[in-house]
Amino acid sequence: MRYLIIACIFAIATFLYGEEKAMTTSLNGKKVLMIIAAEGFQDQEFAQPYNLLTGLGAAVKVACSRKDKATGIFGREVKPDLSLDECRVDDYDAVVFIGGPGASEYFNNAQAQTIARDAVSKGKVLGAICIAPATLANAGVLKGRKATSFPSEQNRLAENGAQLVKQSVVVDGKLVTAVGPQAAKEFAETLARLMQPVETH
């Protein structure tokens, strides 16, 4: 029994060390476009990916439907770097749509949908959390792909051909979706892993 316990502790330590090692890999030179709502983005869903990715060295630009200060549901204020019409997907390694109730402004936004489609067609990492995957669904990029979202939008995803998966974070190739703020940390870590350079031997 003692040996079993030691083995379990070793396995857990190895797993945790591996996760930590993965999260300390440099993202220097990587560029991320993060899209937030003008009013009512989810503060934690923004902060977790922003802080982790910039902490690993990635350059993160924040885009919004307007360039005035954007306000989160808990009062966080962010000054966007770009408006949607200034975004060029070619300039980035990843595009991330942040959720929160205000994210519904992009559900039927032609520019937001074009950005999502361009990210897929150009082989970029594409992420969306909370209700934001609905924008991806409406853009047609979730058809036949595994995905998840906040429960209120799961029917919309299914209606647009997504294969719903009951997990907090779902990865399908370079596409990553997440259910909401409780998954923000895992979502951020997953984005970081997908952006890491592929090691060649």
Image (cartoon, rainbow, N blue to C red):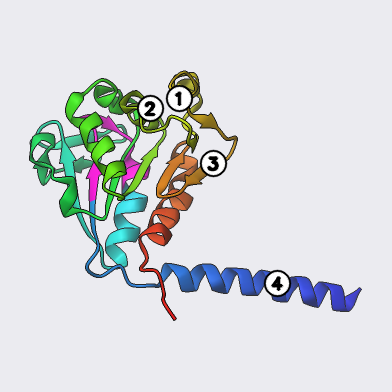
- Mark 1 or mark 2: which comes first in sequence? 2
Q: Amino acid at mark 3?
A: Ser
Tell me the residue that label 4 is attached to.
11
Tag 3 and tag 1, C-beta contact below 8 Å: no
- Closer to the N terminus: mark 3 or mark 4? 4
160 shown above or below 136:
above
Eye-nearest disc, 4 or 2: 2
Mark 4 or mark 1, earlier in chain = 4
Q: For mark 2, what is the residue?
A: 137
- Relative side of 165 to 191, left or right: right
* Mark 3 and mark 4: Cα distance apart in space: 23 Å
Element marked by disc 4: helix
For the residues marked 3 and 1, what is the alpha-carbon distance in whole angstroms? 15 Å
Name the mark nearer the viewer: 4 or 1.
1
Residue picked out by circle 1: 157
Task: Please tell me whether mark 1 sits on a helix, a strand or a loop.
Answer: helix
Mark 1 touches mark 2? (CB < 8 Å): yes
Looking at the picture, how far across and down is residue 100, in whole percent? 34, 31
Q: In terms of depth relative to the viewer, which is nearer, 162 or 46?
A: 162
- Residue under numbered circle 3: 168
Sequence-first tag of 4 and 2? 4
Q: Which residues are magenta?
A: 33-46
Q: Secondary structure at mark 3?
A: loop
For label 4, the crowd category at 10 Å Cα-Cα, with few meaning under 14, some 14 to 19 and many 20 or more, is few
At 42% from the left and 33% from the top, the residue drawn is 130
Q: Which one is earlier in the sequence, the residue at label 3 or at label 2?
A: 2
Label 1 Cα neighbours within 10 Å, binned few <14 / some 14-19 / many ≥20: many
- Residue type at mark 2 is Ala
Residue 179 rendering spot, x and y as whole percentages? 48, 36
Considering the image in quadrants, where does the C terminus appear? bottom left
